[in-house]
Image: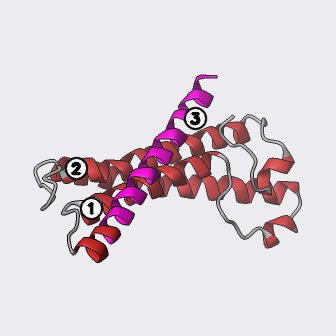
Amino acid sequence: MKLHFLERAIEWFLISLLGVMIVLVFGNVVLRYVFNSGIVFSEEVSRFVFMWLTLIGALLVMKENAHLGMSSLVDRLGEKGQRVCRFLADALTMACCALLAHGTWKQVVLGMDNRSPVTDVPLGLVYLCLLISSVGMACVLAWSLWRQVTGQMSREELVSQGSSAGE
């Protein structure tokens, strides 16, 4: 139940960010073409918001196991082959997430001393979305690996799209 509440809160957060981005970009376009003016920070904030939308949205999509995948080869394998492929894919992806989280942590720490030119926001806060996304994805993958190792993952979940790896 708590995980569902957190997921809904994140979805509403992303909806809010999308609304902010739409207002900033559309407002800036109208101001530029109608009044020959503009919102000074619009481009920079829109870029930062887009990063948060993309990376946190990718985390939610991964939780739902809804990323695009090429499963035509894996579909033709038997159950054992599908289990091996799923395990390897999850383990390698988790290793990539760990490397990404490690590098991003360093970037966030360094970025806290650097400020964006227009809004004066610490760039570490901007890069934080990648850290949250990579750590979150690693957690989703760890749960998937645990379910595979303990035999809790059904055959249908091994290749099918849209199954819920986080439940």
Q: Describe the element under mark 1 as helix, strand or loop.
A: helix
Residue 141 image point, x, y percent: 59, 46
Location of residue 50 in the rendering, given as x and y in whole percent from the top left corner = 40, 59
- Name above or below for residue 122 compared with residue 153: below
Q: What stretch is highlighted in magenta?
A: 1-29
* Residue at the disc numbered 3: 8
Please check the rendered image and state whether residue 23 is part of the magenta-colored stretch, yes or no. Answer: yes
Q: Nearer the viewer, residue 92 or 101?
A: 101
Farthest front residue in view:
34
Q: Distance between the residues labelled 2 and 1?
A: 19 Å
Question: Along the polypeptide, which appears first: circle 1 or circle 3?
Answer: 3
> In the image, is residue 116 above or below residue 165?
below
Q: What element carries label 2?
A: helix
Q: What residue type is labelled 1?
A: Ser
**Quick one: 25 or 163, which is closer to the camera?**
25
Marks 2 and 1, the one that precedes in the sequence: 1
What type of secondary structure mainly makes up the magenta span?
A: helix
Q: Which of marks 2 and 3 is in front?
A: 3
The quadrant of the image that shows the N terminus is top right
Q: Nearer the viewer, mark 2 or mark 1?
A: 1
Task: Tell me the quarter of the picture where residue 38 sits.
Answer: bottom left
Is residue 70 rendered magenta in the image? no
**Mark sitting on residue 124:** 2
The reply to whether residue 98 is in sight is: no
The residue tagged 1 is 42
